[in-house]
Amino acid sequence: MNPEAEARITELEIRIAHLEDALDQVTRSLLEQERGQQEMTLQIEMLREQLRSQATAASSAIPEDERPPHY
């Protein structure tokens, strides 16, 4: 094989190695973001449940026909 073709192949191999590394970094970043999103989704669901239970407790604590304390 001539030296020019060998140099081009070497350059392409180097580029492929850099692309593979960049792809690995993007994949790791994407997985990390996905884990974070799952965690936030769970936290949001927990907060929703807390709000539901607080709303239920608040609505049952004050009957609508009861006079406010300042009367």
Image (cartoon, rainbow, N blue to C red):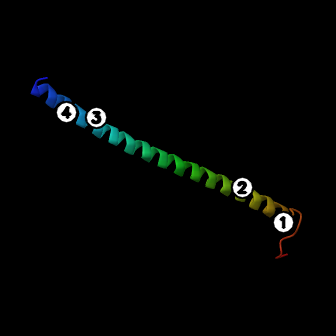
Q: How far apart are marks 1 and 3 (CA)?
A: 67 Å
- Residue 18 image position (x, y, % from top left): 28, 40
Q: Distance between the residues labelled 4 and 3?
A: 10 Å
Circle 4: residue type:
Thr
Judged by depth in the image, the label closer to the viewer, 2 or 1, is 2
Q: Nearer the viewer, residue 69 or 42?
A: 42
Residue at image mark 2:
49
Q: Left or right of 42: which side holds 3? A: left
Judged by depth in the image, the label closer to the viewer, 1 or 3, is 3
Q: Residues within 10 Å of mark 3 (few under 14, many from 20)?
A: few
Residue at image mark 4:
10
- Which quadrant would residue 55 be assigned to in this image? bottom right
First in residue order: circle 2 vs circle 3 = 3
Specify the quadrant that holds the N terminus.
top left
Q: Residue 61 carries which label?
A: 1
Circle 2: residue type:
Glu
Callout 2: SS: helix
